[in-house]
Image (tube, rainbow, N blue to C red):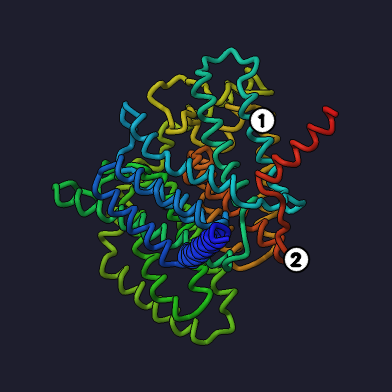
Amino acid sequence: MRGQLALAEHESRRVRKLKTAAAIWLKTREAADSFVHSKFYIAFLAIAAYLLWQSENLLAAIAVFAALACLTLILVRDGVSILPLVLIAPCVVHIDEMPGELWQYALAAVPAVVGLAVHIAVYRRNKLDKSSFNLLPMAALVAAMLLSGLFSSAVQDKAKGLTAMLYVGVLPLMVYLFIKLYGEDKCAYGDYAAASVVIWGVLIAAQAITLYVQAAAEGIDISSNDYMPELGWAGSNVFTTALMLCIAFNFYYMSKSWKFLLPFALLTGVQFACMLYAHSRGALIFTIIVLAAGVIALTVYNRKNPLYWAVAAALAAVLILTLTFYWEKITLIIGNTFSDKMQTSGRDYLYIEAMDKFLQNPLFGAGMGYLGYNSKLQMASGVYPFHSTVFQTLGSMGLAGTAAMIWLYISRYYTVLSARKAWHIFFFVGMLGVEGYAIIDTATFEGLPFMTTIYMFLAVMELERQLDKGQIKLGCTLKELAAAGSKKWKRKKA
């Protein structure tokens, strides 16, 4: 009898402990959920990235962000929460070439892989419905990359071609799928995405200013066209392209309230100054287009607000005064940037080379692993850069890639423009600059940050469309899928 009582008491204590542990786990998850969906979390990531970038300790930077990713993936189900992490994490890299021994950096990233594995194993997936109409064109682009170079006589490095396909095609697709499969209705999607991009823009500007101050302190003339700033993770063309999207979302916040006009106008001015000193002609031209489109969209949204017009008039007066006092300096920098009379920087030869490879193999192009005539040209992705979305597609993937890309663009901008929500419109304003500059540069074939960022935004927009029509439908956990598969196999065996 005593033994039974002792056993019952032991079982009761075990149950109480389990209930306590479950309650602690639930509260921890709720706290993590709340923090991760706040602007404080995004700001925390940006500050951490800046400090780690400044420390110039890449191993520690990867380890810290891998640990953050691991915690986020284990504690938070919502796939949308990875958006600021994916945007900001690459900014810790302070060097433009990875060191020789990569194994230790791969080991430092293991916690992120563990967190992803736990997330996939534990959490219930969403069902992919008809709203996922970007999925098939994305998959078609990966297929076109895989087939690229088929039957081509051009010199190719198959390993580089595979790396390029994984980095430019598969990685963004996997991030898109993760957000779609695990996204939840935990925040206002537009505000969360906008805050992520705006804070990312503040981080980029802070890094650029740090670089300019350091260069000036070393006696370098940063107003000279010979000065080419490198942030490590991004060269002058890349970070200025990223700033175009960030500037567009500054206008999004300005459209929300007249109180945001002054701070976000100042931020835009600082970011434009960062662009001036980057000496990227194309980026400067397309940033002016983004600014003009942003002002037009902002005016349309606030045309009936007298406070907007009052603050806008004051800002216009400040802008005129600033231009008056700094006109000589600004014209000197712009003059230096365009001192080569808008020459093509050799791009015309690359375009001819791309067309040559396309005509040699019209169906599949020269391949994603094409090595090219100029062995010094190579992007981080392994792609030989033809410096143009159009010519890169034709030269590398031929008509197969062109068809996939056209399908991708149609579905992309249908997703962006069909809803006509403010954050969609300002994303489109930013893409005017990014896509426009990509016509003469490499942004489209940069897996990080550009292709992945675009795919993440499309995933969030599709989730928003699902919510507008009702709710996000849940599917099965991995365990339930395995159990269902096991039952099916047993029935077949029987």
Q: Please state, as top left, top right, bottom left or bottom right, where the N terminus lies in the image.
A: bottom right
On residue 162, the disc is: none
Which corner quadrant of the image does residue 107 belong to? Answer: top left
Query: Residue shown at 40%/21% (left/top)?
Result: 375
Relative depth, front residue between 189 and 358: 189
Residue 143 as seen in the image, left or right of residue 263: right
The picture places residue 181, in percent across and down from the top left corner, at 64, 50
Residue at the extreme front: 1
Relative depth, front residue between 219 and 355: 219
Q: Are marks 1 and 2 in contact (CB under 8 Å)?
A: no
Counting the numbered discs, the total is: 2
Q: Residues within 10 Å of mark 1 (few under 14, many from 20)?
A: some
On residue 143, the disc is: 1
Residue carrying label 2:
470
Relative depth, front residue between 40 and 157: 40
Residue 176 as seen in the image, left or right of residue 337: right
- Secondary structure beneath label 2: loop
Circle 1: residue type: Ala
Circle 2: residue type: Gly
Query: Residue shown at 76%/65% (left/top)?
Result: 469
Residue 75 in view of the camera: yes
- Please determine whether, in this image, residue 130 is positioned above or below residue 363: below
Query: Residue shown at 78%/32% (left/top)?
Result: 489
Relative depth, front residue between 55 and 427: 55
